[in-house]
Image (cartoon, rainbow, N blue to C red):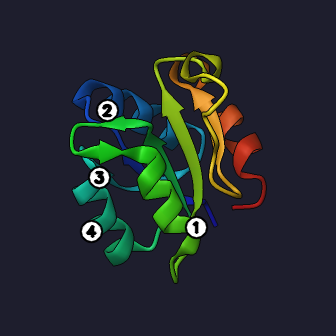
Amino acid sequence: MAAQVLIVDDHASFRRLTRRVLLAAGFDVVGEAADARGARELIARLEPDAVLLDVMLPDGSGLDVARELVRGPHTPRVVLTSSRSRSDFGASFDLPGGCEFIPKHELSGPALAELLGGA
């Protein structure tokens, strides 16, 4: 069974492109959200296996959403993403336990599959 993925990013063009890439790689994209509020609602309703989550959202931090997820009752695998590299965020950029990070320019189906392992 294909991993069910929720895409969270404020740029519609990135969501569309990512959906196509993930579907072609065999993932089941179950939804999309453009902000932290929408992400929280869809995660609670859909309970995806994994969430591809932008670090910087218009109404909050993707890191804050990730921190909530790793403490919640349903804990999907979380892969944070950004148009910036991880080093651009500085030494204080600390991923919540169990979360991964990939820059948007490195995102591909195989790269996400490797980060998610058996999700």
Residue 6's image quarter?
A: bottom left
Nearer to us in this view, 70 or 108 = 70
* In the image: residue 67, left or right of residue 62: right
> N-terminal of the two: label 4 or label 1?
4
> N-terminal of the two: label 4 or label 3?
3
Q: Nearer the viewer, mark 2 or mark 1?
A: 1
Q: Which residue is mark 2?
A: 16
> N-terminal of the two: label 4 or label 2?
2
Q: Which residue is mark 1?
A: 70
Rendered view: 85 above or below 71:
above
Residue 76's image quarter?
A: bottom right
**Disc 3 crowd, CA 10 A, few/some/many (<14, 14-19, 20+):** many
**Percent x, y of residue 77:** 61, 59
Q: Secondary structure at mark 3?
A: helix
Looking at numbered disc 4 in the image, what kind of residue is underneath it?
A: Glu
Looking at numbered disc 1 in the image, what kind of residue is underneath it?
A: Val
Looking at numbered disc 3 in the image, what kind of residue is underneath it?
A: Ala
* Picture disc at residue 36: 3
Q: Which residue is mark 4?
A: 41
* Picture disc at residue 10: none
Task: Evaluate if marks 4 and 3 touch, with contact meaning CB atoms under 8 Å apart.
Answer: no
Nearer to us in this view, 14 or 9 = 9
Q: CA distance from mark 2 to mark 1?
A: 26 Å
Nearer to us in this view, 73 or 13 = 73
* In the image: residue 44, left or right of residue 94: left
Q: Residue at x 51, y 77 (%)?
A: 72
Say if residue 5 shows up in the picture: no
Rendered view: 66 above or below 24:
below
> N-terminal of the two: label 2 or label 1?
2
